[in-house]
Amino acid sequence: MRKLLVAVLLFTGFLAHADLASCWIQDAASSGSLIWLLCQQGALLVSDDGGGKWRQVKLPAEGKLRAIELLSGGRGLAVGDGGTVLASEDGGRSWNRVSVPAREHLSAIHFVGERGWIAGWGGTILHSSDGGRSWVRQLTPVPYSLEAIYFVDERHGWAVGWTGAILRTTDGGQTWEPVRSTAASWSLSAVYFRDVNEGWAAGFGGQILHTTDGGRTWETQPSPVRDWLTSIQFDRTGRGWITTSNGFLVSEDGGRTWKQIRLEQPVFLRRVIEAGGSLWAIGPFGVLKQEPATLAWQSVELRTTPEPAAGQVTATS
């Protein structure tokens, strides 16, 4: 643990990339050697070679885009304000607007194979069974905004959001069950399950919740911070990571306990993803990549060359 802590604290230059001045990174996704970084200003940074080279693509959206998802074969989607759903079939080079039965702000998207779910404000959950080409609305029992959604397979899923809202489904979202937990004292912004039984949720005030019965009941885990916890990920070795406004929480014992790793300056990390066998952590001002051999976090160069605006935008149903 000591070597891991030193490796992160030695990191410098996270905010040094001039090319990022016009891109506050909102979300990230990967599939094979393809990596996407979503800019809050309505652009996409795309790498086809695992992060070696980048290009910038303008997205056809007027409002804020909040989340992206990459599927196989270079297909992917971006979601955002006003019920915006955009889809690409060619690795992000061109985009189509997808018609969906929602006008709420959309916050999160997650796929298992060709089946996908979108969560948003006002308790919104949308579902696609055809790779995101068409969407239907699923009924939910809460009016609260949902900030994160996660499925371990096509049937078992969970969504979390404001005021400690927790929803669970065992039938792919045909029915969503509200879970009332006294452990959820603040709004939740992240949820992750390792299997159909064990999972974690995290959010404001540094709260970490843990379940071993599929989300029916939750208990509070001790947290070393009171920061906003923004995402949860477990790597291939079973080590757990939670991003915070000041760095990471890390678990070396399968998620039973968590320790803080602070960066030298607050960087407001919001997501950890796995890309090309490594972990990547993204925040509004840049990207960190972990070296698997040493566990050290290094800054990622994001020098880009602008591309023409995304191609013809059409509505699909």
Image: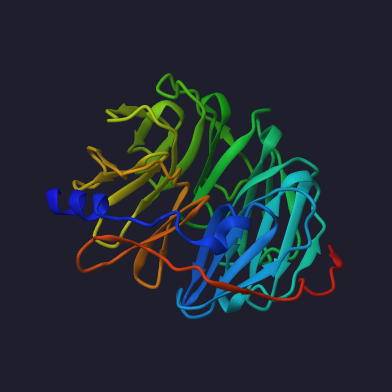
**Residue 10 horizontal/vertical position (percent):** 24, 54
- Above/below status of 158 relative to 12: above
Residue drawn at x 25%, y 60% as measured from the top left: 296
Nearest to the observer: residue 31 or residue 197: 31
Residue 155 horizontal side relative to residue 121, left or right: left
Nearest to the observer: residue 217 or residue 170: 217
Residue 113 horizontal side relative to residue 96, left or right: left
Which corner quadrant of the image does residue 291 belong to? bottom left
Residue drawn at x 74%, y 66% as measured from the top left: 133
Inspect this view and state whether residue 128 appears.
no
Residue 301 horizontal side relative to residue 8, left or right: right
The outermost residue toward the left is 2
Residue 304 horizontal side relative to residue 60, left or right: left
Residue drawn at x 38%, y 51% as measured from the top left: 233
Inspect this view and state whether residue 222 appears.
yes
- Above/below status of 122 relative to 59: above
